Image (cartoon, coloured by chain):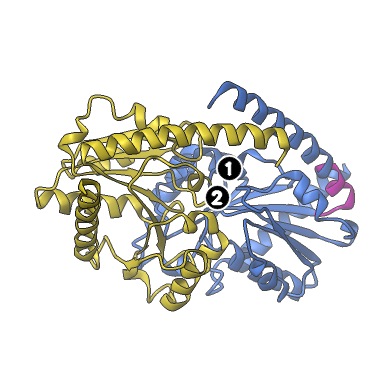
Chain colours: A yellow, B blue
């Protein structure tokens, strides 16, 4: 990268980090657990989030979602069917979400009323990795149809994951997906990161994912109270 | 985007455009037809290219390939099995290929000996759309597992396509892929662009794709001679 561009980019990232840190403190003070969902386009983030919001809402858990896309408001409409408040962030060509986009789309929401806020990032396995959104947990999704080698080919994103979810497990057989190879590729770039398998379409692994999420939120709240 | 960043970005793009134009003239003078393959990560670009190189080589057509990735040389190793000369461009974190990366990786190759040069871009449905590589044809790939709505969600990339190839058609039924919906989404952002369906794994549509490619190359060569 050209030195002048690199310098400007570092400046942008450093400002983003400051704003993300302020957001993180605000989220913690409100007791809201924030999940940043990132993946390649077409990994099934929206379907996964749609099921997650619906299942949490059924249990009486209070959720909201922000969803980022270059264009269209389709995803916000889909997610709103869960009954949760949802806002679309249209980035108008920008390839990732930034902390200030999140901040400006929270206006008018009472964060203290929420248990979880989900942020669905722009589908991109490269650029969103550099932008902290103040999230409590970063979840990187990988579908069984994408190929087991993707973690090692996109190390910054997988290295920044707090959890990796393998999606579309209903297609694993048709896609001849090799779970062990994918697991090894994930662990090679992010040693020790937990990995879960789900099919939001068929429901497989969704109950376990929700248990995990609720459990981790409790742990974080307890740590903050200590 | 911040004005200062926007200005620098425009400067980078304008320099890239100049270099791409010089490359385009060099490719035309050598009679080599250059294909820039772009898609999301996991669409099957490498498998598609591997089959394309092998099938063209079988027919005595002379090919070479450059392949871009953030990390690893895996793809170059895979593609080299076709017998074609292949070079890996490791971008070290940069989310797209640029014309100068292409230019510097051509050193020592006699372009006049080649019929086709394939450039496999970094898997990213956003950023590579802005960077002209001097290609003769830009091919954007979309797999049946990614969702029919992707063209409208990533308009700059699909809008810049000279051809759209739908990959992994062997998984269409399992993924409940709706071809008509995908076709409409493609045409909505790039009216009139040709669309083809393939399964590199099972061979479906590959012969037709090669016929098309060879035919278009002839047409371009004839136009240049007029």
Q: Is residue B198 visible?
A: no
Give the main secondary structure, helix, strand or loop, of the magenta stretch.
Answer: helix
- In the depicted view, which residue is nearer to us: A133 or A83? A133
Residue B53's label in the rendered image is none
Using the image, determine if residue A189 lies above or below residue B25.
below
Residue that carries the numbered disc 1 in the rendered image: B127
The x, y position of residue A10, in whole percent, is 59, 36
* B29 in magenta: yes
Q: Residues within 10 Å of mark 1 (few under 14, many from 20)?
A: many
> For residue A38: magenta?
no
For residue A87, above or below residue B97? above
Rendering quarter of residue B76? bottom right
* Residue on which disc 2 sits: B124
Q: Which chain is home to disc 2?
A: B
Q: Chain of mark 1?
A: B
Residue A107 appears in which quarter of the rendering?
top left
Which secondary structure, mark 1? Answer: helix
SS for callout 2: loop
Magenta span of residues = B24-32
Instruction: Report whether B3 appears left or right of A98.
Output: right
Determine if marks 1 and 2 fall on one subunit. yes
Q: Residue at x 84, y 61 (%)?
A: B114
Asked if the residue at tag 2 contacts the one at tag 1, i.e. Cβ–Cβ closer than 8 Å, the answer is: yes
Look at 19% across and 54% down and name the residue there: A218
Question: What is the distance, in whole Å, between disc 1 and disc 2 at their CAs?
Answer: 6 Å
In-front residue for pair A31/B13: A31
Residue A5 location, quadrant: top right
Question: In screen coordinates, is B60 left or right of A214?
Answer: right
- Residue B207 in sight in this render: yes
Q: Position of residue A80 (x, y in %)?
A: 22, 40
Image quadrant in which the C terminus of chain B is located: top right
**Residue B170: % across, % down:** 45, 70
């Amino acid at each position: 990268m050209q030195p002048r561009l690199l310098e400007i980019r570092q400046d942008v990232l450093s400002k983003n980090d400051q704003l993300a840190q302020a957001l993180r403190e605000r989220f913690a003070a409100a007791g809201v657990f924030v999940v940043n969902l990132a993946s390649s386009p077409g990994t099934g983030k929206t379907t996964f989030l749609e099921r997650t919001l619906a299942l949490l809402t059924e249990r009486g858990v209070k959720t909201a979602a922000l969803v980022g896309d270059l264009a269209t408001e389709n995803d916000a409409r889909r997610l709103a069917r869960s009954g949760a408040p949802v806002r679309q962030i249209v980035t108008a060509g920008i390839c990732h979400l930034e902390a200030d986009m999140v901040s400006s789309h929270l206006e008018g929401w009472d964060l203290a009323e929420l248990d979880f806020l989900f942020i669905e990032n722009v589908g991109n396995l490269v650029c969103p990795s550099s932008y902290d959104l103040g999230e409590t947990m970063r979840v990187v999704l990988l579908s069984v149809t994408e190929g087991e080698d993707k973690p090692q080919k996109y190390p910054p994103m997988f290295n920044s994951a707090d959890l990796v979810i393998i999606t579309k497990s209903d297609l694993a057989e048709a896609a001849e997906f090799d779970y062990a190879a994918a697991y090894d590729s994930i662990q090679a770039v992010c040693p020790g990161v937990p990995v879960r398998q789900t099919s939001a379409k068929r429901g497989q692994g969704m109950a376990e994912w929700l248990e995990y999420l609720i459990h981790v939120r409790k742990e974080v709240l307890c740590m903050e109270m200590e």
